[in-house]
Amino acid sequence: GESVGLHLPTLSVQEGDNSIINCAYSNSASDYFIWYKQESGKGPQFIIDIRSNMDKRQGQRVTVLLNKTVKHLSLQIAATQPGDSAVYFCAENIGGSYIPTFGRGTSLIVHP
Amino acid sequence: KAGVTQTPRYLIKTRGQQVTLSCSPISGHRSVSWYQQTPGQGLQFLFEYFSETQRNKGNFPGRFSGRQFSNSRSEMNVSTLELGDSALYLCASSSAVSGVNTGELFFGEGSRLTVL
């Protein structure tokens, strides 16, 4: 498949471990955040979102944490599987415009 | 429900040529956005269309243009291609309530443009 990024931070984990992917966002006025997953050769796919009035949201095997004080977002993946290998992007939205600004992405590599 | 469809998937052009890319959104989605993805710059927003009108525009030169048709299908055009235009061009659609997007973007698989 195609590589989506040659200069990305990379996180390597073993299958079954928990993964934590971090993101620093830029605008203190951002009020809606989304994590996307992009597998090789595909477009980004929605994973989970969170609004600024929350500091934690859980999905299936994923948890997003938001720290507005330091403008930090994290994605936690429990019991990481080889199928989780992908590039993960955080995206921030300001004031209901829903035109997200994407971060640079983190490449997650899961070793069986 | 069919996903977002982009055509062509791959294309090769030479400098100075122009290119048109097509995007069919998910049925019922009226908002279509275009992004350029490169290894160096990541995902950069080009423009967003809603009901045939450009609502938002990113910071790209006028060589990049787009349009949306009454059936919500969208096209983007790049004229006078440069080597730096080589990228993956992604289209995303979104549902909207009262004209406001609901947040989640549904992406197509992209059109990979190579400029020689």
Image (tube, coloured by chain):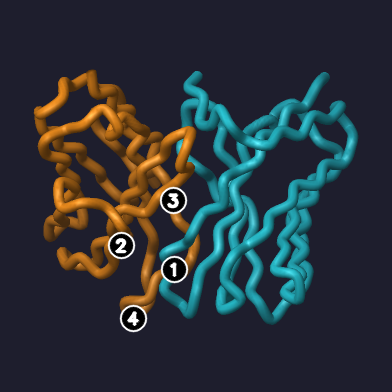
Chain colours: A cyan, B orange
Chain to which mark 3 belongs: B
Q: CA distance from mark 1 to mark 2?
A: 10 Å
Q: Amino acid at mark 3?
A: Phe
Tag 4 near tag 2, CB within 8 Å: no
Res. A24 image quadrant:
bottom right
Residue depth check, mark 1 versus mark 2: number of the one nearer the observer: 1
- Dot 4 amino acid type: Ser
Circle 4: element type: loop
Point out which mark residue B98 bears: 4
Do the dots labelled 3 and 1 sit on one chain?
Answer: no
Q: Which residue is mark 3?
A: B106
Q: Residues within 10 Å of mark 3 (few under 14, many from 20)?
A: many
Q: Is residue A87 left or right of residue A82?
A: left
Label 1 with label 2: CB-CB less than 8 Å:
yes
Of the two numbered discs 3 and 1 in the rendering, the one whose residue sits closer to the viewer:
1
Instruction: Using a 10 Å C-alpha cutoff, classify the residue at mark 4 as few (fewer than 14 neighbours), some (14 to 19) or many (20 or more).
Output: few
Left of A78 or right of it: where is A93? left
Residue found 21% across the figure and 51% down from its top: B61
Q: CA distance from mark 3 to mark 4?
A: 19 Å
